[in-house]
Image: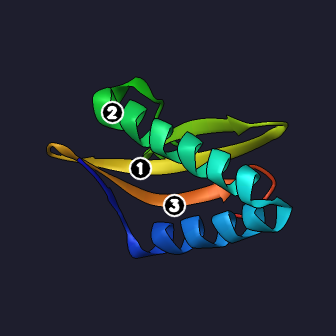
Amino acid sequence: MIRYAPEARADVLRLHAFQKKRGAEVAKRWRELLRSTEHKIAARPQMFPPSADGEARKCVMRFGRSVYVVYYVIDGDDQIIVRLWHGRESRA
């Protein structure tokens, strides 16, 4: 089951708001891509490579010319999305 850490929930809201500025249809497609990515992670959580620090795994979502990176950890049968960034964002 996919769960979200509080920071990741804030990331989703922030990134979705950015897409809404580009248009309702764009935001809808972005949200659908996120749901599809959640299903991929849930179905095969070990499929995606570990992050550079080894503390999480990372799944790359391609949306048009943009790239989004989903960081998640595996906790038993759950996958917890801990952060979600646009590929060009600072991760500080």
Residue 23: image location, x then y, percent:
80, 60
Residue topped by disc 3: 83
Q: Dividing the picture into quarters, in which one does residue 27 lie?
A: bottom right
Is any atom of residue 52 visible in this view? Answer: no
Closer to the N terminus: mark 1 or mark 2? 2
Q: Mark 3 belongs to which amino acid?
A: Arg
| Residue drawn where x is 67% and y is 64% of the image | 15
Q: Mark 1 belongs to which amino acid?
A: Tyr
Q: Residues within 10 Å of mark 2 (few under 14, many from 20)?
A: many
Residue topped by disc 1: 72
Q: Residues within 10 Å of mark 1 (few under 14, many from 20)?
A: many
| Residue drawn where x is 65% and y is 45% of the image | 29
Q: Residues within 10 Å of mark 3 (few under 14, many from 20)?
A: many
Residue 52: image location, x then y, percent:
56, 43
What is the distance, in whole Å, between disc 3 and disc 2 at their CAs? 16 Å
Its colouring scheme is rainbow
Residue 2: image location, x then y, percent:
30, 50
Task: Say which element carries label 1.
Answer: strand
Task: Say which element carries label 2.
Answer: helix
| Residue drawn where x is 57% and y is 51% of the image | 31
Q: Is 30 in front, or is 53?
A: 30
Residues at marks 1 and 2 touching, judged by CB atoms closer than 8 Å: yes
Q: Is residue 76 left or right of residue 49?
A: left
Which mark, by number, is residue 81?
Answer: none
What is the distance, in whole Å, between disc 1 and disc 2 at their CAs? 9 Å
Q: On screen, 25 above or below 52?
A: below
